[in-house]
Amino acid sequence: MSSKMHVYQSIARAVSDHGINTMFGLMGDANLFMVDSFVRECDGRFVPAAHEGSSVLMALAYTHVSGKVGVATVTHGPALTNCMTALTEGARGHIPIVLLAGDTPVANPRHLQGIDQRELAKATGAGFEQLRTPDTVGMDVARAFYRAQVERRPIVLNMPADFMWQEAPYEPQMLDVFTAPGGVAEGGILDEAIGMIASARRPMILAGGGATHARDQLIKLADRLEAPLATTLKAKGLFSDHPYNIDIFGTLSTPAAYDLIAQTDCIVCFGTGLHDFTTDRGKLMQNKRIVQVDVEPTAIGGGLHPDAALIADAGLTAETILYWLDEAEIPASGFTRELDTETLTAHPVDAKKTADGYVNYVAALQRFEEALPKDRVLVTDGGRFMTEVWCRISAPDPKSFVNTANFGSIGLGLQEAIGAGVAAPDRPVVLFSGDGGFMMGGINEFNTAVRLGLDLIVIVANDSAYGAEHIQFLDRQMDPSLTVFHWPSFAEVATSLGGLGIEVRSDEELETALEAVKNRKGPVLIDLRLDPHDVPRMRI
């Protein structure tokens, strides 16, 4: 039975009818009444951001950690342009969210903030849905949620401001999302792939972000083959408790693991696009057979051309390969019998002395790995510092690792850490950020984390410079002074914003900070002071 209500109420009700109880956003004149209805009439929670792009980033991390479709809302014009980097990050990361974006009144084409919002959304790689009429609200909202899940990307739902106070009947609408896994390739290509795997003497199983649901099946296949397991960065932590897990594959591998990868003769890749960082620009895939399995056709051949490609579900394909290996009584390779996993997963530690007033970055990371809460959700910003964090700081599983580098931006970390904290309120969130990234996006939202009472630990790797650019000047024997900044004290800023800020310039001060982390009562920021001339290079 339909009931008549204002359009802003219908939108809020339609979102709630999709099981959404949390919305991130920033209110303006095109969405404020919808937000009010979502909170007051639908018992929803609204998480207000300080910047529009932050609300989208929060929703992205919320989706990743919770497994639910994240929802954000902003008003029109400049509010949506402020979301372009965040939407691109979501589109590149294949993260399903819905952004409820207000639009200027249809009746006023010369509105000061009027732009073509469809073209703007398309430029980011996000999808676009138009709220067509007051009578189609239920179906338009349902279509946005359906597309977000099926297309695995953000969908912008455009809401004209002059619709909001119109009245129309509302009927709940939900579209079934077909979530059954894809099938298994049949015929000659499957036979070729199994033949390559069966004849391999040093096979390896590689899992990417598209295969995290298939952990158990991939382990069974690896154990049957006696093959080591590895992951891409996006699947970090997937095999963390397996005795033959060599951790991250590619430029982030340990030297010993990198050498081992070079010795393999067949790599079976599940759910990974095999980009340049994973393959070290193709070097690691030379002179070996590559089998690539992915449900997404565009992932095949994007980084390199495999010897056999299967457009299929990772778990079902692993089970099928295992079945035929058993049927043919193919013997195990014996490859893992040669391996010393402890050596393969040990990253070298830089023992050289650091200048007075600074902390050795690698040694500090080793100490953080030992001392930070083990049940953490790990979030990393982009930039020079992060490759060592990715290598040295563990996460319990891929859902507990939020990587904000899908678009290569910096300054997205704290916003996504907030989204992760809202998704996992009973777990601590640990964010690693650089000083440039924190100035770009962290200061905007640190107080948001304080207001929400999140259990957040922020480590700012602070060399008072834009490090990636700093090192390029040094490499060419040029003056790097343009890359150096005299930032404010991040510790004092964090304290003034309502959290606890601690500056660390020595090993002793690091221990004091770690003790304060144990006794934290809200967001804590550790300002880790580093020598810009003494920070490891990015592993890319």
Image (spheres, rainbow, N blue to C red):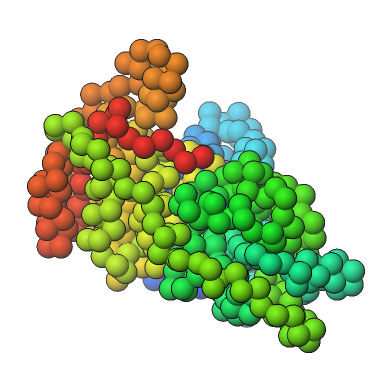
414 relative to 397, above or below? above
Q: Is residue 173 left or right of residue 526?
A: right
Q: How many marks?
A: 0
**Image quarter of the N terminus:** bottom right
- Return the residue nearer the eye: 525 or 514: 514
As drawn, 456 above or below 318: above
Is any part of residue 421 visible from this angle?
A: no
The residue that appears at 43% across and 42% down in the rendered structure is 382
* Vertical order, 117 against 39 (above or below): above
Where, by quadrant of the figure, is residue 453 drawn? bottom left
Compared with 216, 40 (above or below) is above
Q: Can you tell which quarter of the image residue 185 is in?
A: bottom right
Question: Percent position (x, y) of residue 506?
Answer: 13, 41
Q: Please provide percent x and percent y for residue 462.
A: 26, 36
Q: Quadrant of residue 269?
A: bottom right
Going 55% across and 56% down the picture, which residue do you hit? 260
Give the x, y percent position of residue 520. 15, 60
Using residue 149 as the reference point, say whether residue 112 is left or right of it.
left
